[in-house]
C-alpha cells in the first residue's frame, strides 16, 4: 500500500501489511524496480510505520510511526541503517504529511485538541514552524506541488461527510475548490439530497501543471459511483 516513487524513478518506498505474528502490522519496504528486490527498512522498529516519503535528494525515506506509543515523523537511509526520529509531535493518531522538493520542508496534517485536522509546516530536526490552515473543515492528504508553491489537500465537512479537492498557496491565503461533489457528473441529478461523496486530491504531475483527483459518490442514482480518476488543470486558479 501507499507506494512512493523516488525522484530518480528506480526505487519505490511502500508499506505492505505484515503477518499478524510480527512485531507490528505495517512496515516500510524499499523495492528496486530494476531487480524487483524488496528490502525492509524498519523491521527493527516496534509499532507501525506508514506514509513513506522521499527527501529531495533521494537518499532518505521519511515516514510516520507510533514507535514509543505516540505518532512522530522518522527517517531511515534508503541504503539501510538505524531509523531516527526527525519531527517530534507526540500525536495520538496517525500523522500524514508531504515533502516540498525545493527546500525539504514538511507539510503535516495534525489533529487539533478540538478534534479537527489542520495543516502545519515543519522542518526536520527543528519541529513545527507555523500553522498553514485554521478552519473547521478537516484537512487530509496534503500534496505539495513540485515547485513548492501550492498545496493540494482534501477538505471534509464533519456534518455531511462530503469531501472536496482543494488547492491553496503554501505561503497562506485563500483555499479554492478544484473538484467538489457538485461538479461530478450526475451528482446534482437528485435535488435536495446530499449523498456521502468524496473528491480527493491524490497527487501532482511531474511538471506541476496537473492535479490527479479521484472521486466516489455513494448514491444509486449516480452513474459515477465508485472510484473514477480524472486529471484536472488547476492553473487558472492561481
Image: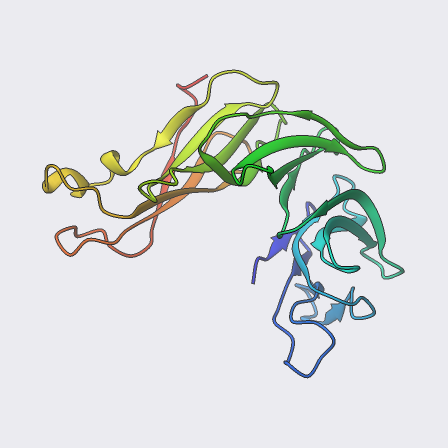
Name the foreground residue: 112 vs 104.
Answer: 112
State the image quarter where residue 213 is shown. Answer: top left
Residue located at (42% from left, 26% from top) = 234
Judge whether 100 appears above or below 214 on screen.
above
Q: Is residue 6 left or right of residue 78?
A: left
Query: Could one spot residue 95 in this view of the protein?
Result: yes
Residue located at (76% from left, 46% from top) = 58
Q: Is residue 73 left or right of residue 135?
A: right
**Residue ranking furthest to the front:** 114
State the image quarter where residue 23 is shown. Answer: bottom right
Q: Where in the figure is residue 222, as x and y percent of width and height?
A: 16, 50
**Residue ranking furthest to the right:** 82
Q: How many marks?
A: 0
State the image quarter where residue 106 is shown. Answer: top right
Q: Is residue 233 left or right of residue 180?
A: right
The N terminus: image quadrant:
bottom right
Residue located at (61% from left, 71% from top) = 17
Name the foreground residue: 147 vs 64.
Answer: 64
Tell me how the rendering is colored.
Answer: rainbow
Query: Could one spot residue 206 in this view of the protein?
Result: no
Amino acid at each position: 500500500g501507499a507506494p512512493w516513487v523516488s525522484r530518480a524513478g528506480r526505487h519505490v518506498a511502500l508499506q505492505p501489511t505484515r503477518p499478524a505474528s510480527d512485531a507490528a502490522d505495517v512496515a516500510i519496504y524499499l523495492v528496486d524496480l530494476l531487480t524487483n528486490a524488496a528490502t525492509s527498512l524498519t523491521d527493527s522498529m516496534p509499532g507501525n510505520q506508514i506514509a513513506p516519503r522521499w527527501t529531495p535528494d533521494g537518499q532518505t525515506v521519511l515516514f510516520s510511526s507510533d514507535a514509543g506509543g505516540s505518532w512522530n515523523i522518522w527517517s531511515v537511509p534508503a541504503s539501510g541503517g538505524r531509523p531516527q526520529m526527525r519531527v517530534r509531535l507526540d500525536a495520538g493518531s496517525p500523522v500524514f504529511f508531504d515533502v516540498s522538493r525545493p527546500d525539504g520542508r514538511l507539510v503535516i496534517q495534525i489533529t487539533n485538541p478540538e478534534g479537527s485536522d489542520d495543516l502545519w509546516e515543519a522542518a526536520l530536526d527543528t519541529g513545527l514552524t507555523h500553522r498553514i490552515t485554521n478552519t473547521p473543515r478537516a484537512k487530509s492528504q496534503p500534496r505539495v506541488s513540485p515547485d513548492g508553491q501550492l498545496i493540494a489537500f482534501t477538505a471534509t465537512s464533519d456534518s455531511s461527510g462530503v469531501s472536496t479537492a482543494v488547492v491553496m498557496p503554501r505561503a497562506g491565503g485563500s483555499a479554492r475548490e478544484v473538484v467538489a461533489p457538485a461538479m461530478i457528473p450526475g451528482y446534482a441529478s437528485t435535488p435536495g439530497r446530499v449523498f456521502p461523496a468524496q473528491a480527493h486530491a491524490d497527487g501532482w504531475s511531474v511538471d506541476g501543471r496537473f492535479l490527479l483527483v479521484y472521486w466516489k459518490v455513494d448514491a444509486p442514482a449516480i452513474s459515477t459511483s465508485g472510484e473514477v480518476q480524472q486529471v484536472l488543470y488547476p492553473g487558472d486558479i492561481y
